[in-house]
Each structure stands twice: as C-alpha cells, then as structure tokens.
C-alpha cells in the first residue's frame, strides 16, 4: 500500500495508539533517536491499512502495527545490507568467474550495535533455514557463531574442501535472502 496523507479519522486513531511505537522500540531495545524514523512508517501503514480494511479489524490493532513495524525494520536492514554488500572495499568480483560475488557473512552486518546484529542475523538465518539443507545450515550457523574450519570439520566429520564446497553451493541462496 502506498503511503498517502492520513485522513482525520486515521490521524486521530494514530494519535490514540501512538504509544505502540515506543513499546515496540523499548521491547526490541532499539534506541528511539536512531530507529523511530524507521518504524514510524510501518506504524502509519498499519493505521491506514487497519482503518481502510474491515477484514483486518478482526485482529487487534497492536498485532497489525507490530507486524508492520517489524517489516519496516527488516526492510531497513535489507537496505543497509545492500549498501554494505556493494561497497567496493568489501566486495570483489572474481575475474575468472564473474557470476559469483564473494563477501564474508561477517562483513554484511558491520557498524550496528550488538543487539541489532543479533536480530538481523537471526532473521537471515531463519530465512536461510527454509531454503537450505540442514548440513549447510549447521555449517553456516557455526561460521556465524565464530567457529573455525577445524572445529566445523571435526563437528561435521568432513574435510576443509567439503566445507568450502558446501558453503560455495549455499552462497547464491544467501545472496538471494539478503537482497530479497
């Protein structure tokens, strides 16, 4: 739904329920100064959709607003990940095989506070778990948790070469999830 100017009814409804924005920020430990502008648009979309769609009104407004604010936060992180992914100093294209972009997972979530990094990582891992076989997911989770190749090889009973092959095979899926 495209954002339009709120009607008087929607504006009043938004004002009456505005505390949901601060509750969302507080419960997710998001600094208001940094994230208010990110989630408010999700909140305002929720107001417009809730007021304009009687089918949504069978749900509590807080549920709809929470989901829209979470989507706005996720979109913000996707946008941030794209910016980071395409910075020249963190990404290079392999001249021998230009269809693969090589970026360590650690470089995708830089310059964010620890809690936001955890939240973003969990969202990404959740999306990946739907698309990747369990072995690749275990390896990716170990890498994200900081495990070295030796630890992964020992835990999975495979060679370094096999780990690299499995990660290379999962790379396109990782990029698709990150870029939406």
Image: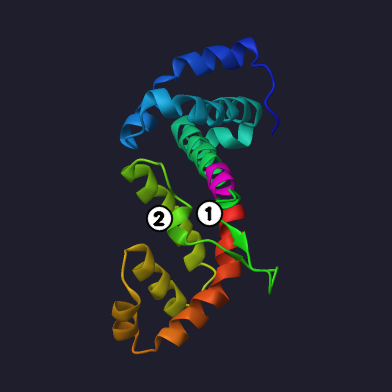
Total labels drawn: 2
Segment tinted magenta in the rendering: 79-84
Above or below: residue 164 compared with residue 63 = below
Estimate the x, y position of residue 61 in percent, counting from the top left.
48, 30
**Display colour scheme:** rainbow
Look at the numbered disc 1 and give the secondary structure of its residue. loop
Considering the image in quadrants, where does the N terminus appear? Answer: top right
Task: Please tell me which residue lies in front, 107 or 45.
Answer: 107
Estimate the x, y position of residue 31 in percent, counting from the top left.
35, 29
> Residue 100 sits in which quadrant?
bottom right
Pointer 1 residue: 90
Position of 33 with respect to 97 (left or right) is left
Above or below: residue 68 compared with residue 148 = above
Asked whether residue 80 is drawn in magenta, I would say yes
Q: Main secondary structure of the magenta part?
A: helix
Position of 115 with respect to 175 (left or right) is left
Q: Residue at horizontal 51%, vertical 30%?
A: 38
Pointer 2 residue: 122
Estimate the x, y position of residue 99 in percent, counting from the top left.
70, 68
Is any part of residue 94 visible from this angle? yes
Mark 2 or 1, closer to the camera: 1
């Amino acid at each position: 739904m495209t954002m339009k100017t709120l009607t008087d009814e929607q504006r009043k409804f938004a004002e009456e329920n505005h505390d949901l924005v601060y509750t969302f920020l507080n419960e997710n430990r998001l600094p208001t100064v940094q994230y208010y502008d990110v989630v408010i648009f999700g909140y305002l979309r929720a107001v417009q959709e809730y007021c304009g769609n009687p089918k949504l009104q069978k749900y509590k407004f807080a549920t709809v607003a929470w989901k829209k604010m979470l989507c706005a936060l996720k979109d913000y992180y996707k946008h941030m990940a794209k910016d980071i992914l395409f910075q020249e100093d963190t990404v290079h294209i392999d001249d021998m095989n230009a269809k693969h972009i090589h970026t360590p997972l650690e470089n995708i979530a830089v310059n964010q506070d620890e809690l936001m990094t955890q939240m973003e990582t969990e969202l990404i891992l959740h999306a990946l778990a739907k698309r990747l076989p369990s072995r690749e997911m275990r390896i990716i989770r170990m890498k994200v948790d900081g495990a070295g190749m030796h630890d992964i090889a020992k835990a999975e009973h495979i060679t370094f070469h096999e780990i690299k092959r499995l990660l290379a095979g999962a790379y396109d899926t990782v990029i698709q999830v990150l870029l939406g």
